[in-house]
Image (cartoon, helix red, strand yellow):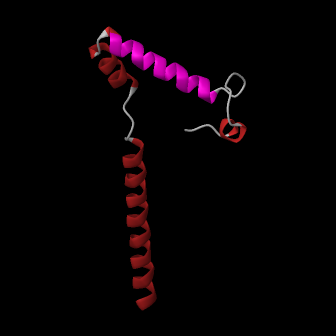
Amino acid sequence: MLTANLVVAATWILVLAGVAFVFARLRRRRTHIGAAAAGAVYEMLNQDKRNAIETIVEEKAAEADPERADGDLPRLEQPRQ
């Protein structure tokens, strides 16, 4: 009888831990804005700010391209994420 109760208790603990793990993973995934939200923010900006953002994005893309970028080789082999 005691063994059966321990098995049931252990099963419930595992189920609850699994549910908590799934909810934690789902919560971590929602940290980034979606494409629609990024587009909406982009449309609200004036032309000067749009040009500045495009320049920043192009510079980051150039940093991530090891064939075209100049600089520190170890940093270029492992670009920022």
Give the dominant element type of the magenta stretch: helix, strand or loop: helix
Nearest the eye: 71 or 67: 71
The N terminus: image quadrant:
bottom left
Horizontal and vertical percent for residue 39?
A: 35, 18
The C terminus: image quadrant:
top right
Does residue 19 lie above or below 32 as drawn? below
Horizontal and vertical percent for residue 25?
A: 43, 51
Q: Residue at x 72, y 37 (%)?
A: 73
Q: Which residues are magenta?
A: 48-64
Does residue 23 lie above or below 18 as drawn? above
Horizontal and vertical percent for residue 40?
A: 30, 18
- Count of all numbered marks drawn on residues in the image: 0
Q: Is residue 62 left or right of residue 26?
A: right
Res. 30 image quadrant:
top left
Considering every residue shown, the one lying at the far top of the view is 47
Nearest the eye: 3 or 57: 57
Q: Is residue 70 left or right of residue 60?
A: right
Q: Residue at x 41, y 65 (%)?
A: 17
Whether residue 25 is visible to the viewer of this picture, yes or no, is yes
Q: Residue at x 31, y 13 (%)?
A: 43
Horizontal and vertical percent for residue 57?
A: 49, 22
Task: Confirm whether the magenta stretch covers residue 41.
Answer: no
Whether residue 1 is visible to the viewer of this picture, yes or no, is no
Q: Is residue 42 left or right of residue 68?
A: left
Res. 33 image quadrant:
top left
